[in-house]
């Protein structure tokens, strides 16, 4: 793609999200979402083949439906409150419709069906943008309307997402689908604590974005999209296998890595609010996630997967240099002792 | 406590910056020095705990376990030298780094004040152990073993996290030093029953309790020697230590909640001892014997009398040293014949008489021969369980008999009789191996002269 055009489109995506996050008028928020959606379609379709076309179409249809539902909720809110400012939503119906619309944008169950298929159809870099940047805008709206969200619906969606994210990823070998199911599960964790303490949602989002960025960059560096090709990294760059191990264990939420911090804080917040069965259930279902991360680490770092002799001498025509990778890896694994710094997110 | 933790952390840069022919020497020497420092903690003048800071403390229960942990690191390093000798330098350094990381987490776990910090470090010990088992184990079953190990422990301990946080909500603080003074009786209700279960299941899985012990034979058999040593000697004791700490907060429910677990342990110790009589795999035999000994510890902790706590602590230390020594002996067999089948390496007394002496001593301590500390532990547990209920003497007596049976079976099969014709070309015992056995045996024998340092905090 022409670099100038690509930059313009990327900037439009950024601008769209920024408009969503910084507006105080509901119409501007809708405009921001639409700008974001329209601009990201060319990015999803960087390679022109039927798979990306299908993925982009699915993405466009779900997100457009969600935006329309959002618009409907905005209008109902306008009818009942008479003003366009973003505060809490004044009508329960509007609140439910808005929550469903934002859940569709985030990929929460029961609106999660598009996430694996879209993520699988596009390239690794586009998948990266899809699973990290695109979550910021809906999450910021959820953060702002959090006082008026119907708790039952949100918690049901959250718990079902954790379940689906765990179970759905069990049968996958394609890395992008694995990351998609992991995103569904993490979104579930984030929305579960939204009503109790939105700060923790932001913390979870921050750490999730760091870990997903790290994972995707490690995949991009070894140009691998399946478990099989990832398992050949011990031939090419053995150090990458250790980094993949650490990051995957962090995503699974094992102490003492930083992926444990959001889970611990969320469990603490939920328990303080006297819901005990819910965090226990969520924590145990997160073990399903850990299982397929472990399977990935087994084939990549903890065993020397069978490969032919000449794989060690693979010609690499260009060594991809990803400068952001080392600090990201450090942050996604060693941040646990900095938990008291949570207060800066308030 | 930092005087032990910081040197242990610094062992990691030591391994990475050492020259190729100095890594084993450097790490073994410095870890021996660190264990000498930790010996000073055994001097506990009163029953009050020694507080080092807000975060670390040392107590007549945790001090012997701490000394055992620091003592075991040089032994693990000595035991691993042979099977790592053919590996590239970086992998040797990675292995030592894993062991050192595990050691750091274990030291911090045994001295943690705040219970959530204890929990985080308890879980943190899983990661290096998993890496050691899956990366350096020898058979394909190690993958399954690692998964069983990780998931059994995590399933048990996630409810523990929720329980600890809800206790913190109720009582305001989880600092162990405060809780011993704030203790109130836990009222009787369904939710408190679940609280009790959530607190205890993590440690029951770790001990392991008889019904949840499936991960142990797999993990012990598939782990390399250092992994087996640390698993048997220390990681199982984490469960016992946790139970001893947490039962102080869980009264009076323990008096009726403990019954199912007592039944499982009492029956389980006989079952696992009996299985030992039918084992063909040497490491598997030692693993099941660990389950059996730990079942005794569970019985002791759940009865909650002063003598039983003394017995539990003594038994933990004694079993740690004995079991680790047995694994080292089994490993010396494995390194020569590359098989764990017992009958393939018989009659070793004729070929390696000094090693046969170590085998004899290890088997004798395993069956709790007087005056070793194994006996003191078992005797205290048997006596206190007799006072709890007279019938248990039958089960305990049967267990002691069967333990003696399988220990002697193991000794006689490997040492006595005519040697097999294919093993007369094995290498003689290395000085390193003899030193390893001596370093295991010496504390065990010396402690029988002054067992009060390992009798825990109910000694009066």
Image: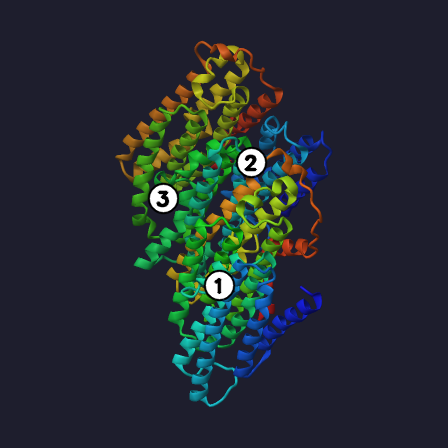
Q: Residue at x 67, y 43 (%)?
A: B10
Spatial CA span between label 1 and label 3: 42 Å
Spatial CA span between label 1 and label 2: 36 Å
Q: Position of residue A324 (x, y in %)?
A: 68, 57
Name the quadrant containing residue B332.
Answer: top right
Q: Residue at x 43, y 66 (%)?
A: A111
Tag in front: 1 or 2? 2
The disc label shown at residue B455, or none: none
Label pair 1/2, CB-CB below 8 angstroms: no
Question: Residue farthest to the bottom?
Answer: A82
Provide the residue designation for mark 1: A187
In the figure, B304 relative to A145: above or below? above
Q: Residue at x 50, y 66 (%)?
A: A57
Relative to residue A309, is residue B231 drawn left or right? left
Q: Position of residue B50 (x, y in %)?
A: 56, 48
Q: Secondary structure at mark 3?
A: helix
The disc label shown at residue A306, or none: 2
């Amino acid at each position: 793609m022409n670099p100038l055009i690509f930059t313009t489109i990327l900037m439009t995506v950024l601008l769209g999200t920024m408009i969503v996050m910084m507006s105080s008028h509901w119409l501007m928020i809708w405009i921001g979402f639409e700008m974001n959606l329209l601009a990201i379609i060319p990015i999803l379709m960087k390679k022109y083949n039927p798979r990306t076309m299908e993925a982009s179409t699915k993405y466009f249809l779900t997100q457009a439906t969600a935006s329309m539902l959002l618009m409907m909720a905005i209008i109902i809110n306008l009818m009942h409150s008479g003003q366009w400012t973003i505060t809490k939503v004044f009508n329960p119906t509007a609140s439910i419709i808005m929550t469903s619309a934002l859940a569709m944008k985030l990929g929460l169950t029961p609106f999660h069906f598009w996430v694996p298929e879209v993520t699988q159809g596009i390239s690794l870099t586009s998948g990266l943008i899809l699973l990290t940047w695109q979550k910021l805008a809906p999450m910021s709206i959820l953060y702002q309307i959090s006082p008026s969200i119907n708790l039952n619906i949100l918690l049901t969606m959250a718990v079902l997402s954790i379940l689906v994210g765990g179970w759905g990823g069990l049968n996958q070998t394609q890395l992008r689908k694995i990351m998609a199911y992991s995103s569904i599960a993490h979104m579930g964790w984030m929305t579960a604590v939204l009503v109790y303490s939105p700060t923790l949602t932001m913390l979870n989002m921050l750490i999730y974005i760091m870990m997903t960025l790290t994972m995707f960059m490690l995949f991009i560096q070894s140009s691998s999209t399946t478990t099989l090709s990832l398992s050949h990294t011990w031939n090419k760059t053995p150090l990458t296998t250790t980094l993949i191990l650490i990051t995957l264990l962090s995503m699974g939420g094992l102490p003492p890595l930083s992926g444990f911090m959001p889970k611990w804080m969320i469990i603490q917040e939920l328990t303080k609010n006297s819901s005990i069965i819910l965090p226990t259930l969520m924590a145990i279902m997160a073990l399903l996630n850990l299982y397929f991360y472990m399977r990935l680490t087994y084939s990549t770092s903890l065993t020397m997967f069978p490969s032919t002799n000449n794989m060690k001498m693979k010609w690499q025509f260009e060594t991809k240099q990803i400068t952001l990778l080392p600090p990201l890896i450090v942050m996604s694994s060693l941040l646990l002792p900095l938990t008291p710094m949570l207060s800066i997110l308030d | 406590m930092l005087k032990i933790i910081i040197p242990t952390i610094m062992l990691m840069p030591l391994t990475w910056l050492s020259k190729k022919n100095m890594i084993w020497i450097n790490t073994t020497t410095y870890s021996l020095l660190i264990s000498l420092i930790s010996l000073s903690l055994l001097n506990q003048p009163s029953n009050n705990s020694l507080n080092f800071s807000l975060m670390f403390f040392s107590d007549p229960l945790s001090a012997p376990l701490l000394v055992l942990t620091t003592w075991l690191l040089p032994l693990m390093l000595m035991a691993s030298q042979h099977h790592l000798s053919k590996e590239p330098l970086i992998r040797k350094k990675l292995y030592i780094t894993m062991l050192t990381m595990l050691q750091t987490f274990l030291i911090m776990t045994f001295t943690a004040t705040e219970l959530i910090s204890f929990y985080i470090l308890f879980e943190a010990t899983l990661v290096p152990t998993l890496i050691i088992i899956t990366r350096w184990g020898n058979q394909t079953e190690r993958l399954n073993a690692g998964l069983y190990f990780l998931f059994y422990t995590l399933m048990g301990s996630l409810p523990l996290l929720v329980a600890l946080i809800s206790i913190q909500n109720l009582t305001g603080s989880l600092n162990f030093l405060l809780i011993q003074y704030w203790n109130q009786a836990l009222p009787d209700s369904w939710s408190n029953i679940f609280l009790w279960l959530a607190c205890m299941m993590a440690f029951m899985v770790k001990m392991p309790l008889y019904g949840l012990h499936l991960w142990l034979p797999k993990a012990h058999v598939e782990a390399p020697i250092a992994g087996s040593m640390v698993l048997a000697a220390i990681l199982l004791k984490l469960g016992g230590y946790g139970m001893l700490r947490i039962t102080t907060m869980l009264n009076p429910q323990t008096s009726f909640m403990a019954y199912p677990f007592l039944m499982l342990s009492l029956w389980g110790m006989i079952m696992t001892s009996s299985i030992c009589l039918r084992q063909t795999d040497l490491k598997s035999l030692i693993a099941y014997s660990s389950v059996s000994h730990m079942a005794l510890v569970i019985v002791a902790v759940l009865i909650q009398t002063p003598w039983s706590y003394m017995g539990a602590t003594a038994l933990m230390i004694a079993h740690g040293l004995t079991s680790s020594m047995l694994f080292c002996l089994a490993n010396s067999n494995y390194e020569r014949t590359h098989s764990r089948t017992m009958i393939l390496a018989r009659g070793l007394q004729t070929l390696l008489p000094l090693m046969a002496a170590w085998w004899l001593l290890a088997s004798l301590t395993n069956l709790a021969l007087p005056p070793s500390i194994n006996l003191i532990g078992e005797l205290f547990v048997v006596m206190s369980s007799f006072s709890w209920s007279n019938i248990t003497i039958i089960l305990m007596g049967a267990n002691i008999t069967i333990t003696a049976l399988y220990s002697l079976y193991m000794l006689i099969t490997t040492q006595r009789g005519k040697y097999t014709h294919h093993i007369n070309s094995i290498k003689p015992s290395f000085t390193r191996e003899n030193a390893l056995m001596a370093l295991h045996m010496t504390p065990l024998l010396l402690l029988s002269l002054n067992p009060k340092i390992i009798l825990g905090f109910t000694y009066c």
